[in-house]
Image (cartoon, rainbow, N blue to C red):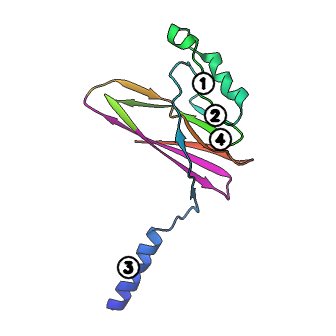
Amino acid sequence: MMRFILHFGLFLLLCSSCNKDNLIIIEGLSTINIADCMLLPQQEYVLSDTASYNALLLHRDSTDECSSYVLPPIDFSQKTLLGKQTIVDGCTASYTYTILADPEKRVYHYQVKAVPGGNCHNEIRNMNWITIPRLPDNYTVQFEVTD
């Protein structure tokens, strides 16, 4: 009986560490500091070329600070830019990012964890811009936000 319990416990331990969905963690993600100078019409972005990236500037705010804003350089032959807007209520917010790939479904999952901090009620908006190794052809991106 003790042997059965040990084998069953070992089986549960091994299965709990299995990835049932066969998702792969994508390494090489980097945050990128893009100023909050644009009034963007979308809440999610997947940008893989310079023309689409520069088109963000069409939505540039007309303030003095933003009128001459230049986007940071990205090598789109090597990288894809992802952005997902989050809104949290707090004094501060901290963010963690994960990219998982599902090769069977040809989908990347961009997971943003947004955690508010402090005892105040301020709306904090963040586009959560990151670059990842270039998205493979015929892959899509699903955006997920948790708190």
Q: CA distance from mark 1 to mark 2?
A: 9 Å
- Tag 3 residue: 9
Dominant SS type (magenta): strand
The answer to whether mark 3 and mark 2 are in CB contact below 8 A is no
- Which residue sits at x=72%, y=40%? 77
Marking on residue 71: 1
Marks 1 and 2 close (CB-CB < 8 Å):
yes
Instruction: Identify which residue is drawn at 51% across, 23% down.
Output: 35
Question: Which circle marks residue 85 in the picture?
Answer: none
State the residue in front, 31 or 13.
31
Amino acid bearing label 1: Leu
Q: Residue at x 41, y 73 (%)?
A: 13
Looking at the rendering, the stretch of residues picked out in magenta corresponds to 95-119
- Does the magenta portion include 117? yes
Label 2 sits on residue: 74
Q: Crowdedness of circle 4 by 10 Å Cα count: few (<14), some, many (20+)?
A: many
The local secondary structure at tag 1 comes to loop
Measure the alpha-carbon separation of dots 2 and 4: 7 Å
Which tag, 2 or 4, sits closer to the chain's start? 2
Q: Amino acid at mark 4?
A: Lys
Inter-mark Cα distance, 3 to 4: 43 Å
Name above or below for residue 115 compared with residue 3: above
Q: Residues within 10 Å of mark 3 (few under 14, many from 20)?
A: few
Name which residue lies at 38% across and 24% down: 123
Residue sitting nearer the eye, 19 or 4: 19
Q: Secondary structure at mark 2?
A: loop
Residue that label 4 marks = 79
Observer-nearest of 12 and 136: 136
